[in-house]
Image (spheres, rainbow, N blue to C red):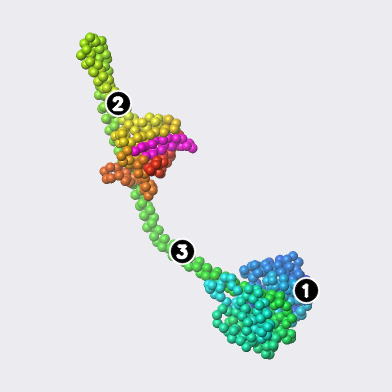
Amino acid sequence: MSAETAWEAGEAPRILLVEDSETQALQLRRMLEGEGFSVSRAGSGEAALEALNGPLPALVIADHHLPGINGDELVRRIRLNVRARALPVLMLTDAEGGADGGDLERRGLESGADAYAPKSAGREIILLRLRALLRRGEGEGEAGPSPDSPGAGFRRARLLLVDDGRTHRLWLGGLLAADGDRVESVDSAGAEAAADRPGDPWDGVVVNLSGLPGGGLDLLRGLEARRQAGAGFRIVAIDGSRPAPAAAFEAGADDVLPAEAGAEAIRLRVRALVRRKLLREENRRIESAMRERLREVERARAEAASAEARAALSGALARANAELESANRALRDTQGKLVQAAKMASLGELVAGIAHEINNPLAFILAHQGTVSRLLAQVAPRVAGDAEAARALEKATARADSMAMGLRRIQDLVGNLRKFSRLDEAGAQEVDVPEAIGTILVLLTHKLSDRIVVERDLAAPRVLRGSPALLNQVVMNVVGNAADAIEGHGRIRLATREEGGDYVIEVSDTGPGVPEPIRARIFEPFFTTKPVGAGTGLGLSIAYAVVEAHGGSIAVDDAAWEGGGARFTIRVPREGAP
């Protein structure tokens, strides 16, 4: 609330007085309260900053010489705070002019003070400066760039200079422009028209009262009327006739400089008033931006609540769909396992039966073949004198040996079939990995034939504790798929190694490889890339289940062959058990 608004509402504008001297604080308090102000006091700069954490006063009056942080530092800290930086500050000092007084005023204004007065200036001057600072309420009638306009960032201040002396006007215009401000100079006849000109608003109007009609007071009153109508500029008067400054203050000036004021004093006073206006503009921009952000937050909350309501309405359907999908997935998995279990059980029974049926006549034939070989060996000495009989006996002996070799191959094949059929042996057991891999390759001879070269690099320990299905099903399925994928001639590499407590089996091939998009699906039941009737899509899904039952993992990536290919990596714990 501004001072004028507070007075109109019947409230006394509150002033924070920062003064360490009890005597001077009492004198200033009596003077201010006698003029209708409400005064609170802080004995140091630190106490003043603590007081500013509460409700802000209408104005701060600070002594330059304070214990702890002095007045300059107090003002700097006030200007660093976004909430308080537009607060008007009047600096007081014991200096009475001269070099020291001018230096103190320069330092005070450069630190951010809005006005400066020696305590010896008297009651009237202090009150005039105080009322001039309070005349403009915060944001009241101040035109400025919109928070969203291009001028909302850094900008140069625009100053209107009114001076009827051409030479002095040129000098003063150059002085103000040296601070980087944009300055336009006019004489008193064109001042009001320039003040009314549409476009960018003026930040400050500097009026040299010397030589103006009526001492320039009518011009000041006209400028004040325009400011009351909505203009936001500050008014600085240079009093050429050197009367008491009260008339210029009452006519609307925010600051009045004596005619003998030097260039540095003029620059500092104008800069202080313009700075305060720009600070208030920035505060309004920040407040507007914060209000807009609050509105955006409220909109976002409303949209979130609406989305939450929609999500709640569709939640039941989503849960039902998820449960149905989960049930379908479980059904597919169970169905795949049942089909494979039935398939393997039937295959095991069939293989065991065939092996048994072959084994009985095979044993009979092997026994008689041995008898035939022995008899041929006994007859050989008796026909030594008959050349024709000896040749026939030699031929018969060779044929008998060939038959023995073929029968032993049949016997080995039957043994491999019997080993493969023993998939129902419960619990973990020691599996001879190289022997198991050899059995698998024998059973897959019809797929490998002579077109595929199988390389073995079995560097891991020979014995792995686990289920025979780990090799008989998993490795056989992977090697069989690799053989099916290779068109024409190619290579398959089987490698084992021990790595970090895991038993690793790698199967690499020189086929076309597994495309990246389908790698996540190849272990799904019934998923296959083979033509209809050429595969069930269960081999790799069962392999995945067997490896998972061993607490391991199976993954596919690109092989290290030149030209590509697929590589399946199977990892199981070294001492794992299903």
Q: Cα distance, mark 3 to mark 2?
A: 76 Å
- Could you say where residue 247 lies in the image, as x and y percent from the top left? 70, 86
SS assignment at label 2: helix
Depth check, mark 3 against mark 1: the one in front is 1
Q: Which residue matches tag 1?
A: 99
Depth check, mark 1 against mark 2: the one in front is 1
The quarter of the image holding the C terminus is top left
Q: Cα distance, mark 1 to mark 2?
A: 121 Å
The amino acid type found where label 3 is placed reads: Ala
**Disc assigned to residue 304:** 3
- Could you say where residue 80 lies in the image, as x and y percent from the top left? 65, 67
The amino acid type found where label 2 is placed reads: Arg
Q: Quadrant of residue 169?
A: bottom right
Boundaries of the magenta span = 490-509
Identify the residue shown where x is 37% and y is 49%.
517
Q: Please tell me which residue lies in front, 98 or 313.
A: 98
Q: Which residue matches tag 2?
A: 409
Q: Is residue 7 visible?
A: no
Q: Residues within 10 Å of mark 1 (few under 14, many from 20)?
A: few
- Could you say where residue 533 lies in the image, as x and y percent from the top left? 26, 43
